[in-house]
Amino acid sequence: MNPILVEAVRGSIRESAHRGAIAVVDADGMPVASLGDIERPIFPRSAVKVLQALPLVASGAAEQLGLGDEELAVACASHNGEPEHTAVVARMLGRAGLDAGALECGAHWPYREPIQRQMAAAGIEPTALHNNCSGKHAGFLCVACRLAGGADLRRYARGYIGAEHPVMKGVTAALQAATGYDLSTTARGTDGCSIPTYAIPLRHLALAFARVATGVGLREGHRRAARRLRTAVARYPFMVGGTGRFDTRVMERLGERVFCKVGAEGVFCAAFPERGLGVAIKIDDGNNARAAEVAMAAAIEAYVRLDDDAARLMRSLSDVTLLNWNGIEVGALRASEELRRLGKAL
Amino acid sequence: MNPILVEAVRGSIRESAHRGAIAVVDADGMPVASLGDIERPIFPRSAVKVLQALPLVASGAAEQLGLGDEELAVACASHNGEPEHTAVVARMLGRAGLDAGALECGAHWPYREPIQRQMAAAGIEPTALHNNCSGKHAGFLCVACRLAGGADLRRYARGYIGAEHPVMKGVTAALQAATGYDLSTTARGTDGCSIPTYAIPLRHLALAFARVATGVGLREGHRRAARRLRTAVARYPFMVGGTGRFDTRVMERLGERVFCKVGAEGVFCAAFPERGLGVAIKIDDGNNARAAEVAMAAAIEAYVRLDDDAARLMRSLSDVTLLNWNGIEVGALRASEELRRLGKAL
């Protein structure tokens, strides 16, 4: 039974509670701290996009196509589908000689409601470019471009979302190498954007992010790629999320000191380079990101040295004041005592 | 520790799980079945709007102002803010000689995204009429109109959301009478629409809905009011929710055989008149309605006799197929085995 990591308080009582597990691991794979079951395999979903983007750099595709930091950042993104995001993804596809028609992620309205309303007011319908995963998929297509060599790229790339396609095989191999977990025998599901997602224990996910943080344990190509991707995201944190998003707000403030990435169903992973640590969180109930964000904010408070401004930001994210429709304070969403104690044990 | 009521499955594994509690109670207050802790007080939020609307009928306000079934149904609603809803609420306020300016619920964009986009495309900004609680608040203002007699209504009604206002005192008294729970000593919070919400155990909430189902245990005025409100909602189920909403879909199919109402933070209550039962559910993690809806669908399957069409609808709501952005089936959201066994024990 996993402990309560996050609680929603209203009036004088706890209204709701989120159980979950968290692993904090160093690059040697040693758990520095943990709560709950960190050995049960869970689907990491979009939290591992940076690992799935390793081949984009390591294959030489990024260099060959002249991708810049914005393109590399959006390849690691679950973005809001704001005009800045779709423009960069379209540019990226253009460099590979492709367009949105090559994306196999499906289309959806941007998650952020104000963006939907702006689009509706402007008479814009969503395309695959607006899919929060479109940057990751554009990255896959850039790898396809590299692998295809002189062959017909559209034909070569078709079906790149399938587990047996050479592009996806490379992505899966990178994920396996970084996590040190055998993906050939673990449970597999289909992600929202149609690529495979593999069940991996939190301990191994945290290890992968400690490796991203330090380079230790990654082979040369992946080490350089991880560093390049972290730098790109630190320079363009807007690209990995967008207006109002947790990942964007945190990395705009903390730069290269934190790389964090949310996933669906209550997953959150992060690399803390200064401390050489990786973190992986899964909230049992999944559902949406509210609890995983609070837990990640508490983990950052526990393990990253913060100046006063950054400390205030992080506290506002780990102890969130809840306002109602009249702007009246009605409660809070906050890290549990047990989670707060995690960092203090060090 | 509450049991798992609902699970989210992806591929071959359980990706997420929702714990919670459910009480099924008859009008004498006898628990017919239950899972989890049904004695811990929880905030019922919007699930008890029908109880909060009892004074609207019992005070004579509805009759005095000539309110019809649509108005009474929207007074029990957490509606989508669709044009049909805002029109009925505006009409209701008009009968009391008021307009949207008297509403103290605050404004918000309708929850349902397509409605937001339609409004944005038409250049419409949200007002308090679009607040999902505007019908309930219009009902409070109709009660104020009745209580004010010949006095200046705007002046009399001002502050009606406060616990000490005569209107809200009547609402609280009705809630206490129906649930048989002492609200003067229990925890109190402020709801999203700024009225007080009182912590009440699931057993007492289920009792209140068994009383709404049967009339047994309610005093004469509330008994007539409960029957009138149930009939109104059965005739206009669109008014309590709207397009695509669980409550609307279920009651469009089942009419007076089920009265069900969702609340925030994973709460759901229902009355099953044919069986003389009341049901109350709280999902521990709150968050959003996905798990509470699945649990309520399973409760309806367990306790309400269904024809084949209705049985298919309810199964599609208690065992929800999850599709991704390409329309590929990726998993399911479904009632747990433990919840399924609940009805079979009878």
Image (cartoon, coloured by chain):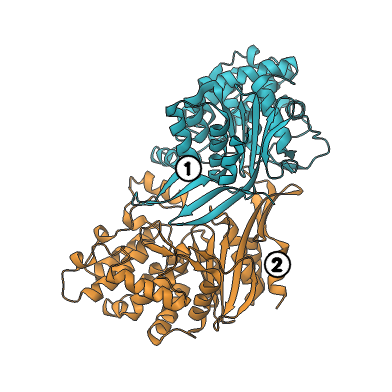
Chain colours: A orange, B cyan
**Residue at the front extreme of this rendering:** B345
Query: What is the crowding at mark 2: few (fewer than 14 residues within 10 Å), some, or many (at least 20)?
Result: some
Q: Quadrant of the N terminus of chain A?
A: bottom right
Figure quadrant of residue B188 = top right
Contact check, label 2 and label 1, Cβ < 8 Å: no
- What SS does tag 2 mark? helix
- Mark 2 residue type: Arg
- Mark 1 residue type: Asp
Q: Position of residue A278 (x, y in %)?
A: 55, 76
In this view, B116 is above or below B260: below
- What SS does tag 1 mark? strand
Q: Which sits in the foreground, B152 or A102? A: A102
Horizontal placement of A162 versus A247: left or right?
Answer: left
In this view, B208 is above or below A325: above
Q: Chain of mark 2?
A: A
Q: Which residue is mark 2?
A: A340
Q: Is residue B106 visible?
A: yes
In this view, B54 is above or below B289: above
Q: Position of residue A313 (x, y in %)?
A: 62, 65
Q: Chain of mark 1?
A: B
In this view, A339 is above or below A214: above
Q: Nearer the viewer, mark 2 or mark 1?
A: 1
x 35%, y 60%: residue: A86
Q: Which mark is residue B319?
A: 1
x 67%, y 26%: residue: B210
Asked if badges 2 and 1 are on one and the same chain, I answer: no
Q: Is residue A310 visible?
A: no
Q: Position of residue B6 (x, y in %)?
A: 56, 47
Horizontal placement of A207 versus B210: left or right?
Answer: left
Q: Which sits in the foreground, B331 or A305? A: B331
